[in-house]
Image (cartoon, coloured by chain):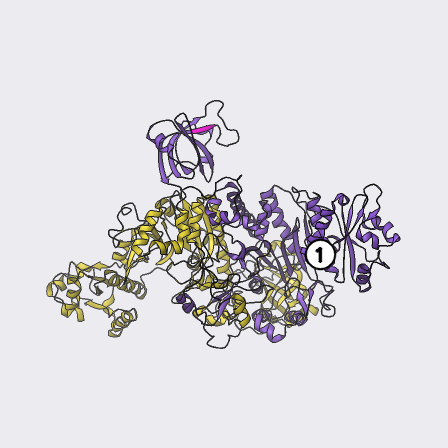
Chain colours: A yellow, B purple
Amino acid sequence: MYRTDRAGEIRATDIDKTVTLAGWVARRRDHGGVEFIDLRDASGVVQVVFREGAAAETAHELRNEFCVRVTGVVSKRPEGNENPELPTGDVEVVADQLTVLSQAAPLPLPIDDHVDVGEEVRLRHRYLDLRRSGPTNAMRLRSEANRIARNLLHDEGFIEIETPTLTRSTPEGARDFLVPVRLQPGTWYALPQSPQLFKQLLMVSGFERYYQIARCYRDEDFRADRQPEFTQLDIEASFVTESDVMALGEQVVTALWRELAGHAIEGPIPSLTWHDAMNRYGSDKPDLRFGVELVDLSQYLTGTEFRVFAQVLSGGGYVGAVVMPGGASQTRKQLDGWQDWAKARGARGLAYVILDETTGEPRGPVAKNLSEQHLSGLAEAVGAKPGDAVFFAADLDRLSAQELLGAARLEIGKRRGLINEDEWAFCWIVDAPMFGKTDDGWTSLHHPFTAPNAEWADRFTEDPEAALAYAYDIVCNGNEIGGGSIRIHDAGMQQRVFDVLGIDESEAADKFGFLLEAFQYGPPPHGGIAFGWDRICSLLTGSDSIREVIAFPKSRGGHDPLTGAPTPITVQQRREAGVDAKPEKAQPTA
Amino acid sequence: MYRTDRAGEIRATDIDKTVTLAGWVARRRDHGGVEFIDLRDASGVVQVVFREGAAAETAHELRNEFCVRVTGVVSKRPEGNENPELPTGDVEVVADQLTVLSQAAPLPLPIDDHVDVGEEVRLRHRYLDLRRSGPTNAMRLRSEANRIARNLLHDEGFIEIETPTLTRSTPEGARDFLVPVRLQPGTWYALPQSPQLFKQLLMVSGFERYYQIARCYRDEDFRADRQPEFTQLDIEASFVTESDVMALGEQVVTALWRELAGHAIEGPIPSLTWHDAMNRYGSDKPDLRFGVELVDLSQYLTGTEFRVFAQVLSGGGYVGAVVMPGGASQTRKQLDGWQDWAKARGARGLAYVILDETTGEPRGPVAKNLSEQHLSGLAEAVGAKPGDAVFFAADLDRLSAQELLGAARLEIGKRRGLINEDEWAFCWIVDAPMFGKTDDGWTSLHHPFTAPNAEWADRFTEDPEAALAYAYDIVCNGNEIGGGSIRIHDAGMQQRVFDVLGIDESEAADKFGFLLEAFQYGPPPHGGIAFGWDRICSLLTGSDSIREVIAFPKSRGGHDPLTGAPTPITVQQRREAGVDAKPEKAQPTA
């Protein structure tokens, strides 16, 4: 037996009890021959004292992170030595037995939350990094998040079903990870980008309420905060409407934030249409912790002689603006910095007007090009005050201009300290377009199984650009934390969507014929949602990166500094796996 | 809104209530112009009646598995028409509204548990197969099993942690599935055969109590009932002894069988040493639902003149027997059948002696070769009665002979109806050998991280064949349903194990240097267990195959008849994934 009690649970009520504890040496110090160690286990820390004898001598040799077992008597700490910051701070264990269970070499990183260590070192020694209280607590929170969601969904009648991860390559917008199949040389499995097709099949099966905390895989470039494997809470239900799924999603989010962030979400979470979100915030995942809305100046600037704006407006484009409160006080260097910022985002620059802090007089390069009339009404048109700056974007492509202004808005929020970091602002984004334009046609904005809304059900093919979907995303503080849709359950309608996407019947049959075939057999109306579990957990732990809530994340390029994965494979592995085989027979029909 | 109530939940207390239901047409029939349908949803079935009007006309056109919505009034069934076998059998819904939500083409397989359809057809249309109550209930049971295990482990202080599935190839006895890495061309991830290394790292991290219902991958040949991806309930704990882990495992199994099989396991589950299991049952996963134990005749037959036995015994080999009760009544053809059976298992045959049903006189080919003395005492030596048959196995390799007898024992149990199919017989197999002999050395019987038991800790290198491990498997009705061990937490001892296995320091560092390195930093004593979740669920559902408890299983060869996976990949996919790239740089150090 390694222990009778857990270190962090010893209390004054245990005084005079003999206890055996096991854990790690968090700190050792001696005062006049008396050895003190802070003994840490998963439950917390308790002070252990070795006053004399062999145990004290051994204790003197302990170094940080040795794993030890001690036996001693729980005692009241001497008056004045209590530590009110520790739950065990009233007591100490006066020990007379000490066993070193294992030693620790000098540590490559200190087990201390206050020391900043490079991420590469942390991940290289993740097993030590995870001993720090921050990462430990992140993992514990994540475990609790799973539990809260599962309990809620169970109570709502959902059942958990595992779907395959060795499956068929299907195009869902990103590249598939591929796996060669030794037993059928020349053929490959794909790792799923999501359980989308399988969960729809489960609805055809009549399960009605399915969920899974599912591992998903996308072979994307490692921009931003992406991982090649990630987790989503995946939910699907039959005989539901958009509002049913949104209500359920709201229950999940509300329970998580209540239990894990101590935050009461006052429902219902507000809904914004996708177009409103773009028009007002220049983003389909707006951060609503602050105002600073975009203003459409296309009408206001009609007839402008400023060539840049005039060209755009005559082409039917968009000119808009966003106000930076107090932005007039920026230095020339700061204003130039905005130009670099915009160029780094692929824009040509960021036109601006400064409103004089006392007179309100518009100044700056753009001001010179605007007429007296357009200048005099500008402040009112954009809702700016003296001392503010006004940033402009103009583009034939309305969304591009709005996205630039939306990004500027976020920068303004950060630079002007407009964002209350303690606030939680949720919203739903609904009525998203079904399709987005590409160079050679249309693409699904969500995925090709998303149903048009009632208004567009019969005529989405007539005006794909305007057609709206029963799609909904949930956003928290500017992060998309979940999204879903009502699905198409009619093979004919599904084919019409494929037609818009330029997927002909044969290609559709080849890629997901099995789903279309399933839809021949009484599919129920259904819809669902998937939550980005890593992102939700990182928000709940206050982390900047999802890597902080993944036990063993990859660093950039998909490299794991701990195991060294990925690695070259041997010639034998390559041969055995059939990597170089040609398929022996025609592709099996789906 | 699609419905107000669920079909299977309508009761006599709902009489006169207007309800809207949605579900599938399980059966339609008409009696004199009145249409009856059995409406099925996930909750059950209710009878719906259309007496007249447009709804009745539409109802007449319904075919099986149409998905429909109906509105009507709950009514008492006419006297004599109640169906006591249905929970809803006292009532029917007299409907006046009917909407066809989707139609169903003629079904490739009937939605009926009593019809036997080939597995290929079932898997090809798994979405329909899963509408049958057997498969539906199997999925529901599995969801409940997850829930029971998670709740229990949560209450015991375990936390759930996800480990990576895109990781480094490590040799654990089977081939890895491999994944090419586009961002580091020429390098590959491996899918994990188990979370073994990661769960040990989590113990080094101080989590103390970890679990995960984990997807695992083994690229094995599809003998028996294997799937390329499978699930295990994976558990690891620190500061535990073998008996701690076994007690926990017993809690899990006890809870599952109590809740899902209505069976009270009377603990503690008996333990057998591995050697006892081999000696008595010829198996390390003995089916204890019946007796029929093996008998070692090596002593008894000393001095025999029967050449086959004498050669084996003089070489230090083993001769043993197993009794087939009533086996003397077998026909010559049946007895010959045993020879074919043995040959199919790779043995040369199965020697036997028949004991005459009345006189007890030994007869048969082997009897002729045995001395009078050996014959006369045989029945007593093996515990046989007149009318029994005695099967023999002799081999220089004791285990081979015992395994043959063990397999014969199982056959005897089946053929003689000795197995009570309603019984549950559990046992632990403990004290397994650390190593097994191979042609060129030693292999780990469990895995190379398994600790020697206390008796062998200091001397396992001296006699690897005899060395025993802190390893434990749990067996149910002849199926290994879980297994684990206390792990080595000392880098020096780990290296000595590698030495026995012929893995030198450089190879060890290359393959799992990161684990050995982690063990430099105060690793705690730890151990764990993993349950074969698919097998456990298949036992609990009374299924022969784990395919019955997997939503979308693969058939033989790893083929999925539903999606058609695996498939060839395109030239572009191959190029993008970097399948043919040579690694650009030396392998990253682990």
Is B156 on the left-hand or right-hand side of B7? right
Q: Which quadrant, please, contains the N terminus of chain B?
A: top left
Is B125 on the left-hand or right-hand side of A384? right
Asked if the stretch drawn in magenta spans residue B332, the answer is no
Q: Quadrant of residue B360?
A: top right
User: Which residue lies at the image location 63% right of the left edge and 42% below the top edge?
Assistant: B263
For badge 1, the amino acid type reads: Glu
| Residue A528 screen position, x and y as percent | 39, 49
Please state the chain letter of the residue tagged with numbered disc 1 in the rendered image.
B
| Residue B337 screen position, x and y as percent | 70, 50
User: Is any part of residue A221 visible from this angle?
Assistant: no
Determine the main secondary structure of the stretch shown in magenta: loop
Front-lying residue, A501 or A444? A501
User: Which residue lies at the image location 59% right of the left edge and 44% below the top edge?
Assistant: B542
Q: Quadrant of residue B208?
A: bottom right
Is A479 on the left-hand or right-hand side of B154? left
| Residue A347 screen position, x and y as percent | 26, 69
| Residue A322 screen position, x and y as percent | 24, 62
